[in-house]
Structure formats: C-alpha cells, structure tokens
Amino acid sequence: MWRLLALVVFAAVPAMAGDPYAFFDWDVSYVTAAPLGVKQQVIGINGKFPGPVVNITTNWNVVVNVLNDLDEPLLITWNGIQHRKNCWQDGVLGTNCPIPSGWNWTYEFQVKDQIGSFFYFPSTGLQRAAGGFGGIVVNNRGVIAVPFGRPDGDITILIGDWYNRNHTDLRKMLDEGKELGMPDGVLINGKGPYRYNDSLVPAGIEHETIDVHPGRTYRIRVHNVGTSTSLNFRIQGHNLLLVETEGSYTTQQNYSSLDVHVGQSYSFLLTTDQNASSDYYVVASARIVNESLWQRVTGVALLRYSNSGGPASGPLPDPPQDQYDKTLSMNQARSVRWNLSAGAARPNPQGSFRYSSINVTQAYLLRSAAPVEIGGKLRAALNGLSFVPPETPLRLADAYGVEGAYTLDFPERPPAPDAAPRVARSVINGTYRGFMELIFQNNDTRMQSYHVDGYAVFVVGMDYGEWTEASRSTYNKGDSVARSTVQVYPGAWTAALVSLDNVGFWNVRSQNLDSWYLGQEVYVRVVNPEDGANKTEMAVPRNALYCGQLHKYQKEQTPHHKAAAAASAAAVRPLAVRRQIVALVMLVVGALVFAS
C-alpha cells in the first residue's frame, strides 16, 4: 500500500501542472548602464537590464510581486496576455492605480488558454524608453500537439530603438511641444551594436552574442520593445522559418528578413546549417524611414557557432531593397497567415473559429494624424479626441459608482476635417459577445502600430489610401492571423475584427510611446448585462490600490524596500500552496480508494 501511495504522490506532482502557481519577486529600480557607450540611468529588474524572461505554461497561475524602487509611480503591463475576465491585472492607468514609489503590489493572473510569445513593460510616463521590459514565453501543455518538432533551444531577442537621454528628459521634450527626433541607436537584448564599422560604431560598446551549436534547430522569439521605430530583423546567411506570432501559430514560411513593428512579437525556427568559418551578423535596422540617414542607428549582434572560426567581418546583410516600392513591407505583412490545421492552447484547431460567418455588430473607424496643439499643449488624438489618463481608473470608478469619470460617446467615425480636436475621456461602449470591426486609418507621415488589450484581433485587411465601405470586399475572410498588435502604414489603413467575449475595460493604444503619451488611446468597455450569481468577471482584488476620488479606501502602506516586499510576497504563497496540497490529497485519496 505505501509503495502504491508513493507512486501516486510521485505521479500526482506532474498532474498538478495543469493549474500550478509560478511565483516571481521583482525589485524594479534604476541601474546604471551604457548600452551605447554613454552612461545613463535605466530601469532594471532585480538589478538586470533587460528584465528576466517569464517562462510559464498555459493555464498556469502567475504571481508577480513588484516592488517599486523608482522615484515615481509604476505599472507593469503584459503585452498580449489576455487576462480573461480580469482586467484588474492589466497594468494600465484606465484600470489600475499606479504603484507609489517605495510600495509593492502583487499581480495575480492566469494565462488561460494562451500560448506563444509576449513581453512585459512599464506602461506609465514613457518608462519603457528606459527599460523595465522582458520576454514572456507561454508554452503549450504536453497534451497539445505543436506543429513543429521540439527545438533544441529557446532564445528570446528584444530589439528596439534607444535614446541616450533619460525617459524623464524625453517626457519633458514632449511636454514642451518638441519631437523626440531620431534615436541614438538600436539595442539587441539591452546591448549596443557590434563594431562592424569603425566610423559608425565607436569602440568600447558591449554587444550581444547568441551562442548556438551546429546542426540544431532553435526557436527564436523576437520582440520590438522600442519607442517608435519599425525594425527589419535578419540573420546573415540564415533563413527564418516563421511559426508563431503573439499567440497564433502561422503558416510556416521562410523569410530572409521580416519587419517587426513597435510592440510586435514573432517566433521563428532557426536551423544552424551553415559553415562556421566565422560568426554571423544578427541585424535590426530601421524601416519606413530614410534608411541612409538612419544607418547609424542599426543594431548588430553576433550569432556564434560553438566551432566558429572567428568574428564576423565585412558589410552587413542588405536590408529590403524597396526604396521605390512601398508595398513590399505591406505585402510581407499580408503574407503572415493563420495555420488553420494547428492546435493552439486548447485541443481544438485554430481554424474552428469561423470569424467570416459572424455578423459585425459595431464598427469604428479610428483616424490618427500628426500631433497638434490642443489648449496650448502638443497632443495626439484618435477621431479628434485626445485621451488624458484619469485620476480614478475607469474600471474602479465603475465598480464604486463614481460618476463623471468618463463618457460613452466615442464617435464611430472621424469628425469633419474642420472640427477642432479636443481632450476627452470618451470610451467605446462595446457589446458583450458582439463582433466589432476596428479600422485604423493612419493619416500621419510616420509608421504606427496599435495594440488591443484583452484580446487577439483578426487582421483582415490593409491597404494604402483612405478606407471606404468598398474596402471590405478586399478583406481576407479565410485565414487572417489573430494577434494583439497591428501595424498601420503611413497614409494607409488596417482593419481588424474582434469578438467581444472578455468583460472588462480594455485599452486600445498606439504602441509608439510618444503618440501614446500624448493621448492616442481609447478604452473599450465590455459589460455583461446579465451578470449575476454566475460572475463573468473577477471581483475587485483584495489588494487593489485606490487613488483619485477613491483614495479614502486606500490603507496606508509604509514605503519599504526589499525585505518587506519579500515578506509580502511570501504571504501570498500559502493560499496557493494550500490549493495544490488539497488537489494532491484528493488525487492520493482517489487512488487509494480505487486500489482498495
């Protein structure tokens, strides 16, 4: 009997993997770094820049205790994580009060029915321009088939433009009505470029080296965590087999390079099948700009085989040659399709959701333009409305009946050309279980990308020019990829469809930090009118922070540092551990009963 009990206990531990807890303790603080050779203050996590990779499996419960050791408020948002029924964990100012300096707050959420490549970052006050970001890997459960062989390794690569000025200086520039201008460089995993060119890259800059073995296959997850620059990613001499983007398996296609726009994530299979006479360049260069002017901001790392004959040398692999063909990048984006035959996080094929057969219940044409002056301040807008973060988060205001926090009059179409833009807290009133069409029209001269929190959207179409009703005839109604961040080319539009089955307040924003900071965002309110005993949304968290008109509910928390934060995190663990012990005991008892 005891032998049987031991076997059951041993077997039960993996069985709990369907719903385990993963705990993380993060001290978010300033650290000194010089990624481009100039010492500056960056945001690190546990002293590291960039932050750690969060490696978890679908359906896991994630508990992240964040200590804010910065000198200003902080929120962490989880780019692409859907937070089913739980916008309280979204980490944006429309749903959460920021964590005051010296305080800690614990995020707790489940990555329910999600797989794929995502990232996290600080969401307030241009802080992402200073760091605080890192990758998120959500693995399939073992019972779900993956549409490719098991890779020999999993590598996260964070690319992004970078300024040598602190994020507070960048904020000040925007507040004074100035543009940020060309960045000072492009980082790869928080490091500057390899010195491939003595005149463009000064000596003494640390670069990233990615170590691999010959004859193997690696999954490479690439995230553009930068401020506002689209980047072309390529690895000299190697093909990139695209397999997934932001939680959706794609049809498997080889690319010699791929444009990764701000806020987007892709994963590729890289086969190390080249000779090892020397290292290979890994390149992230600016796109949809004057690339000859922007040549100095190119990011360069090295791919190094274990039997490499020496460092890389010579010119970088060429970027796409489309100076006279602006459709090349868009056609590449259109080529990214959903793999309808692949299983996703759940044991059903991705193609089982027939989005083309669902009637659209709401349609919003969201037009953006270059920032303009509103009330003496530089502001960016959608449909003529520039959003100002609220003192009382919108979802919290709803829960406590605070009136006047927002209005439900966001226009479905842009205003007349002569209408003056204005500041407003106007919200889209989404219909629960409705089907919404979002058309992003970019009338700016810059590349933009837009993110929808809480959802993956079907990217059904994009083209240059003005969107019209006739544009719907060009939509891909078969295998459009589902993702959370869509690119919108200058003078062009992108259309997306989304099923509003996730209750809460969800942020729709420009991923370009300057546009977002200046007000280019809106929230979608999705409420279940029949919500009663069978709740479709999580309750207000017990540890919710209160601010604005609800600050009277906030219990005082003495500003503290690492020791107290660790104790607070430890207090969260016992309940989760008890849950797992109860599940284990039930399994053991069940096995004993069956054996008897």
Image (tube, grey):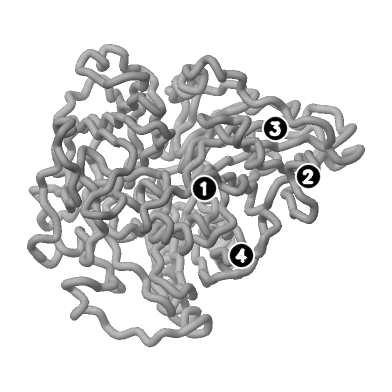
| Three-letter code, disc 1 | Val
Q: Give the mark nearer the N terminus: 4 vs 1.
A: 4
| Three-letter code, disc 4 | Gln
Q: Nearer the viewer, residue 293 or 51?
A: 293
Q: Residue at x 58, y 32 (%)?
A: 232
Question: Which quadrant would residue 579 be assigned to in this image?
Answer: bottom left
Distance between mark 1 and mark 3 Cα atoms = 19 Å
**Is residue 296 in view?**
yes
Q: Secondary structure at mark 1?
A: loop
Residue 570 position (above or below residue 63): below
Distance between mark 4 and mark 2 Cα atoms = 21 Å
Query: Mark 4 = which residue?
Result: 40
Q: Secondary structure at mark 3?
A: strand
Query: Mark 1 = which residue?
Result: 225
Query: Mark 3 = which residue?
Result: 235
User: Can you say which quadrant of the picture contains the N terminus?
Assistant: bottom right
Q: Nearer the viewer, residue 507 or 149?
A: 507
| Callouts 4 and 2 close, C-beta under 8 Å | no
Q: Residue at x 18, y 55 (%)?
A: 535
Query: Mark 2 = which residue?
Result: 195
Q: Residue at x 64, y 28 (%)?
A: 240
